[in-house]
């Protein structure tokens, strides 16, 4: 993984930069000691590490603005950081950057139930947004697996999804407005508590821009009334093809479950050994969850079970109680942990058209043999978002590189069948150099033109998302 | 000018010396600007439809009716319920899917399932320099690079001319129910609609008419789904809403129920009436207070109060309502700019984006600012 060489002129001015930052922030909010900056050297993509020049932890929009203005004036790159849970290296520092962490900014600013929104500082964690409203019967819908730890700032940067977005959408569908600090330190308000943009949909392009357009400090989020109840069914099949057909038939029957999760045999075996959820040993397992009142759930599940039964399941299990529901979800929720018990793994995130599921799984199986690396598949089957987990040994020389090459081949396959490189994790550095596979130069130019408008000097998280050769002229022109 | 292909359109834009007026079905007269007309209707046809994946891809000039017919055959629909402007604006022609997307047109169901932009998975377009650009794709979850898809929805062709769009579709509903509350004033109606929308009963439409056709106020709450489910939720909502006023429940197409939601969607109440027509988006709890300041001849509330349609006597209504957290668009009338003026820092970003995507300022020049 190549990163641009750090700017020597920035490195040489470290003391001066730190001193200016200390002038606008409390003493404990500027971290410049080399030992302490190591805490910020990576995110959840731990294979790549680089301590930043320094890290700052502002407490509000005004402090963020002051930091940005200094960095802009002094030509210092900034890398924003939520909770550091990115699997794509979105918060990976460069040696010449200031890490701007939003962790201290976790207040709830306003809760409004009649208009169904909450305004929070963006350092607040995803789950604690729901925590702030659930006693009143509401929740915040996007639910990435890391929701206990991940920050709303990072959710907005990556347009995070989750298991339940088949029904509720991803972050961009639940974001109403932001307060954002631009690279030059100016503050803009985009959107608000009302619906849709009156002019260009700037909010739409800010969400998912991986911290490259500005630092979002406050966000107004749509909250929804909690459903009366939810219950899953579990079904096991002898082949991926059949399981894929069941997914298609459910969708075509007019039922819209909140979640359709898929696991293949390697994943089932690993999770059974780890979590002992009582899953059947089969080629493909589906968990389908629906919502509503008890009677509504019964009616929907009856329809789903009827479809499932037509395809000769090896197992069909309906949760009759909260306890049984929890057991059905147990294995799925422990899947990543279970795979981690076996080995180091790399988690991919490509999306494919649902119809291509059997073909893609077959090809992944073939490639697994060619590369000699195991792979398990967990999958948001309703929306085609795959999570192949490639197993490798980080201590074995060359294994990481082999794993990355395998991963790249899987992602190329996703694009080839009409899908994309990343469904919810983001590009970061991880998929940066594969962007050429999905996008032509003109497509990338159009995206980079947006960054030119928001951050003309390319100081903000600039070495991410776009292949370095594609962004080189712009980064150089900006002094990067 | 009638481009037949994306390449035609690219050549045409590259060669253009004067402003171009981009036209789909031509049913939204407020979005017409001066310039050589580029008629997109020749670039038409559904290029891919996978019902099992809930996705449809179509060229921009495809008539909306053709898409609706194809979806209906598989018991699916465009869930964002795009409005038809023809009756309201007295226009003719066939709405196109490109026009729907370019204007981010959404109906009453926007309040529950989202707007057109929320269902838009991918676009192809030609920018103001003639570059052919694609963004997004045809899968439901995609965070690969910047989301220009959202930026193009609602850009009214000012950043580029759409050539192909891909959309997420949803299953059709088996049954529709409606809970009607009679006799509420505007403020009470918004409170009642908020109670309904804040309940777990999955309300998919919440509209209020201060004057129904018989002259009395009526508030309409819609629920959709399987038969038993609609009946159950209608009963629960009736109990929930009783404290607000007299409540009646209708299930199925009794008394033209479905058509009445079409009339909400298409703002039929204002059709043929003289005056200016405004479309105002605010948070619901601001709506009644704002309407009190409007001095409108008639209003209609949708989106639980978050969307106000107002018929006024003319002049720039925005001056009368003062600072508003939201936006007002002039759908019919000439007294003011069509789009709500943006705060200076936001306007600067929008202008800079237009300058990047349309450096010669030839695409629907002046429409959005």
Image (spheres, grey):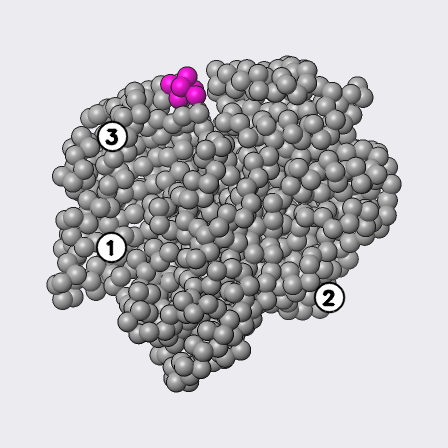
Q: Are marks 1 and 2 on the same chain?
A: no
Badge 1 vs badge 3, beta-carbon distance below 8 Å: no
- Write down the quadrant of residue A432 in the picture: bottom left
Q: Residue at x 55, y 63 (%)?
A: A62
Q: Mark 1 or mark 2: which is in front?
A: 1
Verify whether residue A295 appears in magenta.
Answer: yes
Q: Say which residue label 3 marks.
A: A327
Q: Residue at x 73, y 32 (%)?
A: B300
Q: Say which residue label 2 marks.
A: B18
Question: Image check: A69 left or right of B210?
Answer: left
| Position above or below: B273 against A465 | above
Q: Residue at x 57, y 39 (%)?
A: A112
Residue A206 in sight here: yes
Q: Chain of mark 2?
A: B
Verify whether residue B158 appears in magenta.
Answer: no
Q: Residues within 10 Å of mark 1 (few under 14, many from 20)?
A: many
In the rendered structure, which disc, 1 or 3, sits on the residue that comes first in sequence?
3
Considering the numbered disc 3 on the image, is that residue within a helix, a strand or a loop? helix
Q: Position of residue B272 (x, y in %)?
A: 82, 33
Q: Say which residue label 1 marks.
A: A346
- Write down the quadrant of residue B234 in the picture: top right
């Amino acid at each position: 993984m190549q990163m641009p060489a750090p700017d020597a002129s920035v490195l040489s001015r470290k003391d001066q930069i730190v001193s200016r930052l200390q002038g606008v922030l409390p003493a404990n909010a500027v971290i410049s000691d080399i030992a302490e900056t190591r805490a910020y050297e990576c995110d959840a993509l731990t294979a790549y590490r680089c301590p930043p020049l320094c890290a700052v932890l502002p407490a509000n929009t005004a402090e963020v603005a002051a930091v940005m203005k200094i960095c802009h004036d002094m030509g210092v790159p900034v890398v924003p950081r939520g909770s550091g849970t990115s699997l794509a290296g979105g918060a990976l520092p460069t040696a010449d950057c200031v890490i701007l962490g939003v962790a201290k900014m976790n207040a709830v600013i306003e809760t409004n139930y009649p208009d169904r929104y909450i305004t929070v500082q963006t350092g607040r964690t995803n789950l604690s947004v729901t925590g702030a409203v659930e006693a009143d019967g509401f929740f915040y819908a996007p639910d990435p697996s890391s929701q206990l730890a991940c920050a709303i700032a990072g959710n907005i940067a990556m347009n995070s999804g989750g298991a339940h977005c088949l029904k509720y959408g991803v972050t961009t569908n639940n974001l109403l407005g932001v307060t954002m600090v631009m690279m030059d330190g100016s503050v803009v308000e985009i959107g608000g508590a009302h619906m849709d943009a009156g002019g260009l949909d700037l909010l739409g392009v800010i969400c998912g821009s991986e911290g490259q357009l500005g630092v979002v400090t406050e966000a107004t989020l749509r909250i929804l009334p909690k459903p009366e109840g939810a219950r899953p069914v579990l079904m096991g099949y002898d082949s991926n093809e059949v399981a894929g057909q069941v997914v298609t038939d459910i969708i075509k029957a007019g039922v819209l479950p909140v979640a359709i999760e898929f696991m293949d045999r390697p994943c089932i075996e690993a999770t059974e050994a780890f979590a002992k959820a009582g899953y059947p040993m089969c080629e493909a397992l589906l968990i389908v969850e629906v919502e509503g009142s008890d009677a509504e759930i019964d009616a929907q599940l009856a329809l789903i079970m009827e479809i499932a039964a037509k395809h000769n399941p090896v197992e069909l299990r309906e949760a009759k109680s909260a306890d049984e529901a929890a057991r059905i979800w147990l294995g799925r929720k422990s899947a990543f942990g279970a795979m981690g018990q076996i080995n180091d793994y790399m988690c991919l995130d490509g999306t494919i058209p649902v119809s291509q599921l059997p073909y893609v799984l077959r090809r992944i199986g073939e490639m697994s043999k060619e590369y000699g690396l195991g792979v398990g598949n967990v999958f948001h089957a309703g929306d085609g978002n795959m999570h192949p987990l490639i197993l490798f040994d980080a201590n074995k020389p060359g294994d990481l590189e082999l794993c990355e090459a395998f991963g790249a081949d899987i992602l190329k396959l996703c694009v080839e069948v009409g899908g994309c490189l990343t469904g919810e994790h983001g590009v970061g550095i991880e998929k940066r150099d594969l962007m050429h596979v999905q996008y032509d130069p003109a497509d990338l130019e159009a995206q980079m033109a947006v960054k030119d408008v928001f951050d003309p000097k390319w100081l903000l998280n600039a070495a991410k998302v776009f292949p370095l050769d594609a962004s080189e002229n712009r980064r150089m022109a900006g002094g990067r | 000018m009638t481009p037949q292909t994306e390449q035609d359109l690219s050549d045409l834009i590259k060669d253009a010396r004067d402003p171009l007026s981009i036209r789909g079905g031509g049913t939204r007269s407020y979005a017409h600007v001066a310039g050589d007309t580029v008629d997109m209707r020749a670039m038409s046809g559904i290029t891919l439809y996978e019902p099992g994946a809930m996705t449809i891809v179509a060229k921009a000039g495809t008539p909306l009716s053709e898409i609706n017919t194809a979806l209906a055959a598989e018991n699916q629909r465009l869930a964002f319920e795009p409005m038809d402007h023809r009756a309201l604006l007295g226009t003719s022609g066939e709405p196109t899917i490109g026009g729907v997307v370019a204007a981010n047109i959404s109906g009453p169901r926007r309040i529950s399932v989202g707007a057109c932009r929320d269902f838009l998975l991918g676009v192809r377009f030609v920018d103001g320099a003639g570059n052919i650009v694609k963004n997004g794709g045809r899968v439901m979850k995609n965070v690969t690079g910047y989301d220009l898809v959202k930026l193009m929805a609602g850009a009214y062709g000012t950043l580029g001319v759409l050539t192909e769009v891909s959309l997420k579709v949803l299953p059709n509903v088996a049954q529709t129910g409606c809970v009607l509350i009679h006799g509420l004033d505007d403020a009470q109606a918004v409170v009642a609609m908020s109670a309904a929308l804040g309940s777990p009963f999955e309300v998919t439409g919440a509209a209020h008419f201060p004057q129904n056709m018989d002259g009395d106020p009526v508030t309409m709450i819609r629920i959709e789904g399987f038969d038993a489910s609609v009946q159950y939720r209608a009963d629960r909502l009736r109990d929930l809403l009783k404290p607000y006023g007299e409540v009646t429940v209708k299930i199925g197409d009794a008394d033209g129920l479905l058509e009445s939601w079409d009339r909400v969607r298409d703002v039929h109440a204002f059709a043929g009436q003289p005056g200016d027509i405004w479309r105002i988006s605010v948070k619901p709890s601001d709506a009644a207070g704002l309407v009190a300041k409007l001095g409108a001849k008639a209003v209609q509330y949708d989106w639980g109060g978050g969307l106000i349609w107002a018929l006024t006597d003319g002049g720039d209504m925005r001056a009368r309502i003062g600072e508003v957290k939201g936006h007002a668009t002039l759908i019919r009338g000439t007294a003011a700019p069509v789009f709500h003026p943006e705060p200076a820092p936001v306007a600067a970003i929008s202008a800079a984006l237009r300058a990047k995507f349309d450096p010669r300022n030839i695409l629907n020049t002046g429409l959005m600012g």
